[in-house]
Image: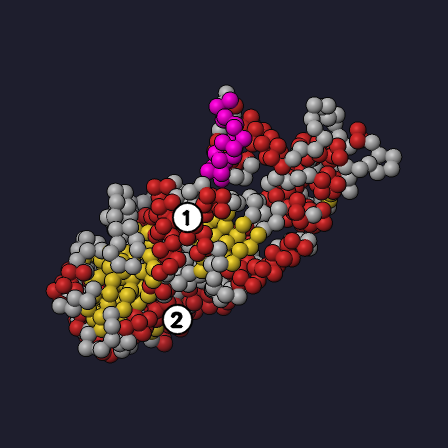
Amino acid sequence: MTYIVFIINKLIAQEVSLMKDHSFNAPAYQKRLHIAWQHFIKNEDYDYSFMNADILHSWERSRAAKVDPFGIVNKILTPDELNLKINNNMKLIEVAHPYMERLYSFIKETNSYILLSDKAGYILDYLGDNEIVIGGQLMTRLVPGACRQETVAGTNAIGTALYLRKPIQLWGNEHYCEKHQLYTCSCAPIFDSSSNIIGAINITVLKEHAHPHTLGMVLSASDSIAKEIELTSAMQSIERISAQRNTIIENMPSGLFLLTKSCRISQVNKYALKLLGLSYEQVIGKNLFDYIGIDDNISYDSNCAFLEKERYNEEASVSLLHVAMPPKKFRLSVHFIKANTGDITGTLLRFNETELIHKLVKNVGGYSAHYSFDSIIGNSEPVKQMIQASKKAAENDSNVLILGESGTGKELIAQSIHNASASVNGPFIAINCASIPNSLVESELFGYEKGAFTGADKNGRPGKFEMAHGGTIFLDEIGDMPLDIQAALLRVIQTKEVVRIGGKYPKSVDIRIIAATNQDLLQSIENKTFRSDLYYRLNVFTINTPSLADRGAGDIRILADHFVRVHNRDKGPNIRISPDVYPLLQSYAWPGNVRQLENVIERAINLVEKDGLITVNQLPEDIRRASAKIPLHKGQRHSSLLEPIPASVPDVLNVKENEKKLIVSALEKTGGNMTKTAKIIDMNLRTLYRKLDKYQIRPSDYRK
């Protein structure tokens, strides 16, 4: 406040020096101005050239707004409106009022009146001598809530200063309204940091008591108020950002250290202190490397070298100095904090537990199992036996081998076992061994270190076995795994350790292995395409998934109804299967098993008529042809159900013939495109090629 007084006194001296010869308040000038005003309000010609241009233009604006020069302000806010104005401008009032009090201490008992308005010219606050305050409120309605805009109150210090966006002093008859001409008013707008007007401060005195230096006083006060508001806003912004930063830092699932350029700790979160067994008082302001060593090299220079470049999630060994305990593995990240100039002002060092990374794989990476034994649909005896065997497998952590044809739900069983096992809280990672190119299988399964090969991620990457740590890895189509990878997989099963490509040291993994195949692995062993030792390692617990044909007519009907409920949500709840359809579904061989049945039902729903009834005509042709062996109901004819069937088609198609026809039909539709064919029949590409070789089908015969 002492500084403000100094500035005010200095500005007063400048104003007095500059305006000591000012004649605005001289009787002769005021008399001449009054004569000019009388002509002006009558819209008469007169020589106004002696007037200040800003004042004359303001008179013109007042006349254009039809302000009554003999009236008083009649636009005053209601109490509720005034309360709202005050609440919206509380920051301005709280900052300005102490300056108003300071100003009043200089001009007290001089018949002076200090007013504060908002940016629209409405009076918010006031201080002054009782005599002038009461007179002003009676004569000119200078009360809180009164509007001082030029269009309402004519030429006046507050309204004109806000319009011109600059300080102004109005002497007596320079006012447009007659009742205001008793006063001299000095006003200065208050600006924010973006040069927007947020209010105005005004001093009103009786014109016979006016002093030129009053304008300097309000200008100084306006400037000081603006600077304090800007400073207060900046401090509040800093406090808000700091609070947000602290909240973010404390709620991060990582240990965080903010370091100065000299590696001293400027901020640390509780999680970091907990990870390293340190206290806040112990480390704040201290050099981080007085307490820890990275990569077992605890010399100061070497540790600082670790911070010389940005890093992301690199595994490192961290030692606690002066504590007799082995180093602990962490994932460390280094991020530079830069100023607007690009200069590095500090460093963020982030610690992650390696165990936490593995837990995040499940939640963030989406590697989780969604199905349980309750998800298995069917009441047949083979299904009951499969579920019983699977539940037994879930009770221990032995390796499981699931055997069954394509489309019988092998992954459904694998997920159910995982969700019923002790590993339920860990990730479930499924990988199709037949869909990964041979050149990438090893890196996908076992991962690689940085720089292990051309095109590798610069930071290295964990493999699926590492990501499955604490959970289950499901190796689907394991019969298609290359022989050299089979040897590496056997080593993982035996040692429970993984060595990345390019890595030197093994990493322990705690995983449950479930494998599945639709191949005859014993035949593959005989053909030298599958290792016998791997087979016996995997075949600790064998589960057979029955084909849909083996499950019987009851399960086919239950599954068909289930798939109608699943897939008809967008079509409405009234879709149903005609009784005539069930015999066709139950007599069909289903080479694609449950997956094929689901696709057939989904297709039928998309073709259903407005009555919502799935009929025989919505079924694929190969299923309709199988009806030749369906026993007829009394009085029923095949022609009422089906289109004519060519005589050349055999009565019943066996499974192999159906599968061959299915592949040929898909090839015809796709013009021999193998990728699209595999997608249509829901078969992986490697298996499709094997089937083509088995049935001696050439895709080139179908290419257009």
Mark 2 neighbour density, 10 Å: few (under 14) some (14–19) many (20 or more): few
Reply above or below: 7 against 453.
below
Dominant secondary-structure state across the stretch colored magenta: helix
On the question of residue 279 being in view, the answer is: yes
Measured from the top left, where is residue 433 in percent x and y?
43, 46
Residue visible at 52% across and 39% down in the picture: 683
Quadrant position of the N terminus in the picture: bottom left
1 or 2: tag closer to the N-terminus:
2
Q: Tell me: 490 left or right of 99.
A: right
Residue visible at 19% across and 77% down in the picture: 322
Residue that sits furthest to the top in the current view: 704
- The range drawn in magenta is 684-701
| 692 within the magenta span | yes
Q: Which mark is residue 531?
A: 1
Residue that sits furthest to the front in the current view: 526
Q: Tell me: 389 left or right of 318.
A: right
What amino acid is at disc 2?
Gly
Q: Secondary structure at mark 1?
A: loop
Measured from the top left, where is residue 84 in percent x and y?
46, 65
| 529 within the magenta span | no
Mark 1 neighbour density, 10 Å: few (under 14) some (14–19) many (20 or more): many
Q: Secondary structure at mark 2?
A: helix
Q: Tell me: 301 left or right of 586.
A: left
Tell which of 406 and 249 is nearer to you.
406
Report how far apart the C-alphas of labels 1 and 2 lie in the structure: 108 Å
Residue visible at 52% across and 28% down in the picture: 696
